[in-house]
Image: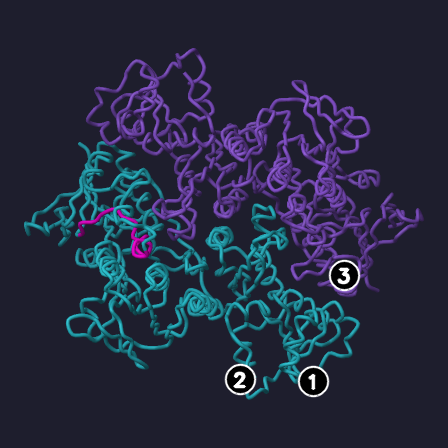
Chain colours: A purple, B cyan
Amino acid sequence: MPQNVLIIGAVAAGPKAACRLKRLEPDARVTLIDRDEHISYGGCGIPYFISGDVSDARELQSTSFHMVRDEAFFRRAKGVQVRSRTEALAIDRVARTVRIRDLVTGVEEALPYDQLVLATGSRPNRLPVPGADLPGVFTVSNLGEAIKIKERIAAGQVNRAVVIGAGAIGLEMVEAMADLWGIDTAVVEVRDQVLPGLVSPAISRMVLAHLAEKGVQEVYLGETVLRIEGDSQAERVVTDRRELDADLVIMAVGVRPNGELAKSAGLDVSDSGAVLVNSRLQTSDPRIWAGGDCVLGPNLVTGRPGFFPSGALANRHGRIIGTNLAGGGDEFKGMAGSFVLKCFERAVAAAGLSLARAKAEGFDAFSTLVIQADRAHFYPGQELMVLELVVDRASGRMLGLQGFSPSGDALCARINAAAVLLGQGAHARDLGQVELAYAPPFSAAVDVLHAAGFAAENILAKKSRMVDPEEFLEQFNGGDGDTGFICLDVRGPENAAPFVARYPDRWVNIPQEQLMERLGEVPRDTELVLVCNSGARSYEAQITLDHHGLSATRNLMGGIMALKKMGTRLTD
Amino acid sequence: MPQNVLIIGAVAAGPKAACRLKRLEPDARVTLIDRDEHISYGGCGIPYFISGDVSDARELQSTSFHMVRDEAFFRRAKGVQVRSRTEALAIDRVARTVRIRDLVTGVEEALPYDQLVLATGSRPNRLPVPGADLPGVFTVSNLGEAIKIKERIAAGQVNRAVVIGAGAIGLEMVEAMADLWGIDTAVVEVRDQVLPGLVSPAISRMVLAHLAEKGVQEVYLGETVLRIEGDSQAERVVTDRRELDADLVIMAVGVRPNGELAKSAGLDVSDSGAVLVNSRLQTSDPRIWAGGDCVLGPNLVTGRPGFFPSGALANRHGRIIGTNLAGGGDEFKGMAGSFVLKCFERAVAAAGLSLARAKAEGFDAFSTLVIQADRAHFYPGQELMVLELVVDRASGRMLGLQGFSPSGDALCARINAAAVLLGQGAHARDLGQVELAYAPPFSAAVDVLHAAGFAAENILAKKSRMVDPEEFLEQFNGGDGDTGFICLDVRGPENAAPFVARYPDRWVNIPQEQLMERLGEVPRDTELVLVCNSGARSYEAQITLDHHGLSATRNLMGGIMALKKMGTRLTD
C-alpha cells in the first residue's frame, strides 16, 4: 500500500519535497495544500516583478522551459495533487489527519496522512502603529500582494513612496520603485544604518552613498515610525522627526515564522514561534517534517539554532525532506547565513556574521576591511571590491565576511568560497590559502580575498594595528580640530598635497618609499594615523616605524578609498 | 647579527618571499637576483599586453598605485637589494655561497647566504622540430619576448599567425592576436581537442564552436607539426596534414620547471626536473627553500605531487617562504588545480581533474554535465552555464568540476566554492549543499552548481543513467542511420516537431507531462535515448519509464542545449 503524504505549503520547500519524493517513490500519494491561489513561485523575484525586469507574474511561477507550475502541471508532470485556496486548520496527531477548509466553498474536511510536511513559511511583520492596515500599506509577502503593488504603480497612482525598513528587501523595493518607474522614494529605518545587523557601519555608508548617487537622497536613519495617516488610504508616514507624504507605503520590517499550526498541535517550537527540527528536518513528532522559512536551523558559525528565511535554503530543505520521506537519511548540516543583494549598480553580499552580530553573539571579535581591484589591477575594467572580514580574537576563527562591489558575480566568487570555510569553523589564515581560479580578467594573483585573510593574520600576530574608517572619521571630525592624532600620509606628494594644504597642523606627507631615509621628519609625541590609498602601504609604514621604536600608530583600514566610497568628507 | 637571505628569481614567488620576510624581520639582508632585466611582473598578463588591453609593459610591472617595481622601488620601498641581469651558476651548499655572473660585465663572484630561496620558475617547451628556433617563432615565456611579439604586431608585420598548442596559453594568444588586431590566426594541436586534459571533449567542442563564431575557423586538431620553414625567418608551419603560412609562430606547448640549479647542487628533484619540497616549502637542504613554478606540490585530489605552474600559486608560495625564512611555521597544504580562461566572450574554468585526467590517474570515474541559467531563470540577462562534475564511482568523491559560461565571474562563483570542497576530498552530495549567496540577479534558488551535485548523486544511487553528448553524437551520426536506439523527445511538440519530421524512424515525441497517460505509445524492443532541452525533464521521464518496467533508457546529458553549444549537427 503506497504511503500517503500531505504537505502544507506550496511555495518552495513544499513543492520541492513533493517532487523529490515522487522521483524516489513514484507510487507515493502526495497532496500539497496552500491557502493561496498562487503556488510554487519564486518569491525572491517579487522586487524584479515590481520593477518591471520581470514583466509577467507567471514568469515567477514558470519552469525554466516556460511551463507554468500550476495545479495541472503538478498533477500531470509530477503526479502530485495540489489543493490551493485551502487552509490547514489543525493537526490531529493521534488520528493522523489534518482538518482543512476550502477557502472558496467554506467546506471543511479531515485529510489523512501517513507522513506530514510543514512548509508553512514566514509572514512579514507589520509595525503595531496606527494606520498600519490602511489601504496603500503593503508588505512584500506573496505574489498576490506584489500584483496589487504593481497594478497601482502601472496605473500611475504612485508618484511618491515610503519604504519602512532598510534591510535587504526594503532596499530591493527601493530600487524596484525608484529605478525604472522613477518613483520618488524615501526610506525610514529605525536603526542608525542601512542593512543593520548585516554589514558594518562603514559598508552601510558606502551603500548609502551609492543610493544618493542614484537619486535616493531621502534615507532617514534612526527614526521611529509613529503612525501612518490617511483618510481612505495611506497618505502620510509620520516619524518621530518628520512627516513624509506617500501614495504607497511598503513595510519591510522583517518576517516571522508561521509556526502556529505546529504549536497548537503540540510540536516543539521556539520562543519566536519557529518549528524545531532535528538534522533530518523531523519535528518532535517523527511522522511530521518541517522545512523552509518556518523552522530554525543550525547556524554553523554560532553553533546555535538560527532563523534564516531564504528561498535557496527552503529548496535545500525541501529536497532533504523529500529524500527522507522516502526512507532516506539526508541531513541538513546548517547554514553560515549567506546572502547577496543588488542595489542599483552595486552588490552587497555576505556569509556569516557582521561584527555587530558577532559581538552580540558573545564573540570577542574584530574586523578588517580591505579594498582592492576585483581582477588584476592592470586589467581594463577592473573595479574596486571592498571586503570586511570578521574574526574571533582568541581563536583566530573566521566569523563572517561582508563585501561591496560593482560586480555581484565577482563578489559572489569570493563570498561563496568563504561561505564553505565559514561553515567549517576555518581560521582566518585559511582564507589566504583559498585556491581561487586565477586569470587576470577575473581575479588577482594575490586576490582581495587573500588580502583580507592576510590582514586578519597580521592583526592576530599583533603586527598590524588598525583604525576603522568610521571611527577615524568620528575622531577626525570631532574635537574642534584637535583629534589627538596626526595623519601621516605615505602616498606620493601628488595625492597627499591637497590634504596637507587643508590640514597643515594635522596632516604630514612622507611617501612610504622615502620613510626609511626621512625618519627624522616623523612627528613624535603624538599618535599617528597612517594613511595611504588602500591601507597596504601604510601597513608597510607601520612596520618601519615599529622597527624604529615609533609604535604609537594606527593604520587607516581601506585608506582614502574607503573614505571616498563612504561618500564622506573630512571637515575642518 | 641579521641573517643574509639570497633569493634566485625575481618574478613572483621570489619578490613575494623577499617582501614578506622584510615585513616580519626588517633587519634581514635580502638580495634578489634574476637573469632578466624585467623583474616582478605579472607574467599572466602577457596575452593582455599583446592584445592591447594593457597598453604599456610597465603596467604589468607596476603596483596597484602605479609605481614601477624596479630595482629602485625594491630598495627604497621594501629594503630589498635586487641584482637583475645576473645569473646564478652554481650553489655551494657547504660554503653556503652561490656563484653568480653579471650578464652585462661578465664578472663572476660568490654571494654568501644564511638561507637561500629558489624561485627559478619554469620555461616554455620548444618542439624539437626543424625551424623551431627561426626568428619569428616565439614562446610566451617572459616580458622580453612579449615586447618583441607586440613590436612586430604593432609594426604591421603580422597578417597571419599560427599558434602551436591549444592549451590555455595558446587560446589566450589566439584571442590576443585575432580579436583586437584582426590577425588571421590558425591553431595546430597535436591532441584531438582544444584544452586537452583540462576539459571534456564536449566542453572543448563548445569552445571550438565559439572560436568559430569569433572568426577563428582554422583549428587543426590531431595534427603534428613536422617543421617550421623559412629563409631568414619563419614563413610556414608544416604539419603531417598541411602547410600553413605564418608571419609569426607562437609555440605554446607547455612549460617545464627550471630545476637544473637545484639538481646540480645535489638537491632532490623529480624525474621531470622539478624541485622537491616539504609542506614548509623546504628542499632537501633545510637552508634552501623553493616555490613557484619550479617545484612540485601536493595535488589535493590525486594525493600525489603535481606540477601546476600558476602566478597565483607562486605568490602563495612566496608568502609562505617569507614567513618561514623568519622562523615561522607556515605550510602549503596543496592545490586542487584551479584555473580560469577567457576565450573571447566565453570563460572556461575548472578545479580538480577532468574525466580523462581522473581516469589517467587511475580513478574509476564518471562525469555528469548540466546546463542551466546562471541566475534565476526569470531574471533578464541570464545566460546558460555548463558545468561538468567528475566523480569517483566507488566512493562518490568529487574529483573535478569544469565549466563553460559567458560570464567568467559567475563561473568562478561556482568553481571557487567547489575548489574548497575538492581540496578536502568532499563527496558529490556536498556540492548540492553548498551555501551560495542567493538573489535572483546572481544565482538560482536551486543553482546549476547544486544541480551538478544532485545529478551525480542520482547516478551514484543508480536512479539515473546518462549518455554523454559526445558519445550520443557519435552513435547517432554513425551506423548508416541505424543507431541502435530511438530518441524519445519529452519536450513540447513545438520543440520536438522538426526533429520528428527529420528523423521519422528514430525520433518520437511524447511530452514529459503526458508520459504517464501515453505509456502505450512508448516504443518497446529498442533502447531509448531520452531527450529534452537540458536533461532535467528527460530525467523525470526516465524515472517514470523505470517505474513501468521500461528501463532500457539513457538520458542525454545537457539535452539539446548541450548539442547546440557544441555547434554540432545531427546528420542523417
| Residue A548 location, quadrant | top left
Q: Position of residue A150 (x, y in %)?
A: 71, 43
Identity of the residue drawn at 65% across and 59% down: A64
Say the numbered circle drawn on residue B525.
1
- Among the two numbered marks 1 and 2 on one chain, the one whose residue lies closer to the N terminus: 2
Left or right: A362 with respect to A481? right
Identity of the residue drawn at 41% across and 48% down: A443
Give yes or no for residue A497 being in the magenta stretch.
no
Mark pair 3, 2: CA separation: 38 Å
Element at label 3: helix
Examine the rendered structure and indicate whether residue B482 appears above or below residue A492: below
The residue beneath circle 2 is: B478
Label 3 CA crowd tier, 10 Å (few <14, some 14–19, many 20+): some
Q: Nearer the viewer, mark 1 or mark 2?
A: 2
Residue B346 appears in the rendering: yes
The residue beneath circle 3 is: A73
Label 1 CA crowd tier, 10 Å (few <14, some 14–19, many 20+): few
Q: Position of residue A245 (x, y in %)?
A: 69, 26
Host chain of mark 3? A
> Disc 3 vs disc 2: Cβ atoms closer than 8 Å?
no
